[in-house]
Amino acid sequence: MQKFLSRLVHNLILPAVFCLLILMGCGKKDNPVPPETDTTPPRIIYAYPQDSAQSLPRNTIIYLIFSEPMNRSSVQGAFSCGVSGDFRWFGSTVVFVPASPFAANDTVRLSVSSAAQDNAGNGLAPAFSRWFVTGGVVDDVRPTVSALAPAAGQSGVAVGANISLRASEPILQFIIGQVKLTDSLGNSVPGNTSWQDSVTVVFNPSSDLANNMRYTVTVDTILRDRCWNRNEMATWQFTTEADNIKPTVVSITPANGSQEVSLKDSVVVTFSEPMDTASVRAAFSISPALSGTIAWSGLAKLKFKPSQIMAVRRAYAVNIDTAARDINGNRMAAAFNASFITDRVVYAACTSANMVYVMAKSSGQEVQRISASSPVDVACSPDGSKLYVLSGGASGSLKVLDPNDAHSQVRSIAVGSQPYALAISSSGRHLAVSNYAGNSITVIDTLSWAAVTFDVEAGPKGLGFGNNNNILVVCTGARYLYSYPLAGGPWQYRSYTIVEPGSEGLSLSAGRDTLYLCEGSKVSVFASTTDFPWASSSAIPSCSRVLRRGNLLYVSDSLSNRVRVYQATPTGNFLQWQADITVGTGPKGLGLSNDGTKLYSANSGSGNLSVINLTTNAVEATWTVGSGAAAVAASP
């Protein structure tokens, strides 16, 4: 039995005690820091009348200024002066207005006991007491207010002047004077009122007054003298100086000389003074001409908002000639001129989204969306004057757009069935389109816009212009790399070489004498002469597109979601691997920035562009575009 009890204590009671100790320890809290307590007693820091004052009007008021906010009822209960009356509070100041005049020639004893408390319950310390002596009169004369500066009827007043006024006797300064200033159009002028001394009030307008304008000053009957008499209402007028200062432009956005300005920016011009808006509209111009709307913020800031995006990489000049006038008729002393250059852009052809996304090169901001049916490729003319969008489907087409006119369509050219890729000759004179389902190539002359389509072997995909007046195309279905003449003679291949299944992406060196081809699971190098001698190859899991920059090759590996980097010149029979760059899902198209410092990867699975810094071989930004991003091109 004893063993049983011992075991019971061990198994039940001790664990319970242990848990209780843990809970007590876990529940322990730091000692709370008590809030700071106000123990400072309030004081009276000023009182009227002065101690031992003589011959005061019988209806004089009493006012006390405390060192801090007070419990008002406690103050009024602790107050004594021998007569009844009303209490008026102005912050920490209390005014006692006698219900009837004090007795004539009487000594008034004033006291406030320590029962007067602040809001924390601290009693007044020290208690307050003083006395004063009344005279034999009651003061019922209302104070008057007169103009000090500007004088009534004064003209030529400076627009930066303050308004000063003088009372006929001391005024209670803790009552804010109601000074109102209005112009001749009835508009109130904002400002603030301050006391210069017991009889002088100053009204300071928040901004300069208008030129050649008549203003009216009105002082309402809110002021009080020391016997609680209201002031007489006062009003007078003055006129400001004429304006003979010529207006100027003090700022413009975009700033003069700005580069890479957003194609969606507005032009904002700030003048030195309010302007005659009609004359400014007539004097304002932008070249090349832009349609848009003008809005004003006040009368000194103009905002011009273009009705469409501006041209890509275009210099614009803003001019305001001397016909622009201020509201008083002064012309600008000299014409104003400024200029800026808009940003370059990056185009992403998004097949599934049926859209080409236009992105600002400098910021990645989406500038525009261009509708296109299943766009599969996109390219810019070498001079940047045209944008080419290749639309897929059974009846393919090539759209020619104008980047200088918000990418409006110039023409649409029919090509073959299910177009796959677009190539541009080095001069920009010729375009070539591979028609995958039509087993054909369409060649377009950009001078006449004449298009010729001729048959090739099965399944043409990647293509480009060689340096031998030829078009190079890989025919995936036939598993051959062909060379066709650009012009002259029959449209027949001049030479060919066997390639691997799944070959598609094709790129050429700057001199167009070396060809790089994605052959399914490898990238191969060929000399782009008529006999296509094989040079080298290197294994890649899923080679989709290839692009050369300098002595490096960049290859999109769509299955492993990366761009692989190789030396462009083979070592022995192989390309040397340099680096792997992780990008979005399903990378396909590749494009270079105009300065060759950025590589753009169109990621079809994730619907975005990876912006790769080619100095560091690292992704520095990701731009969201539409689904099925298949191709990318940057404006030159």
Image (cartoon, helix red, strand yellow):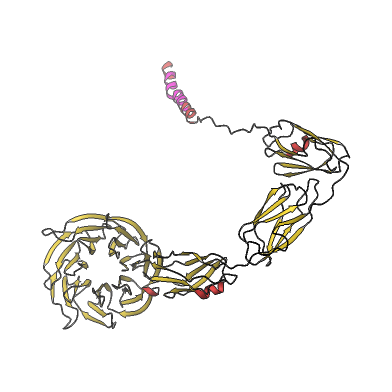
In the figure, is residue 40 to the left or right of 47?
left
Question: What x and y, as percent, mark residue 89?
Answer: 74, 44
Residue 557 placement: quadrant: bottom left
Q: Is residue 353 visible?
A: no
Prevailing secondary structure class for the magenta stretch in the rendered image: helix
Provide the residue span drawn in magenta. Answer: 5-19
Residue 84 in the image: above or below residue 461: above
- Against 122, residue 430 (above or below) is below
Q: Position of residue 542 (x, y in %)?
A: 23, 60
Q: In front here: 625 or 253?
A: 253
Q: Quadrant of the C terminus?
A: bottom left
Q: Is residue 469 left or right of residue 42?
A: left
Q: Is residue 9 magenta?
A: yes
Which of 252 and 98 lies nearest the eye of the viewer?
Answer: 252
- View extreme (top): residue: 2
Find residue 609 and report its horizontal and vertical position in percent. Answer: 33, 61
| Total marks placed | 0
Is 611 covered by the magenta stretch?
Answer: no
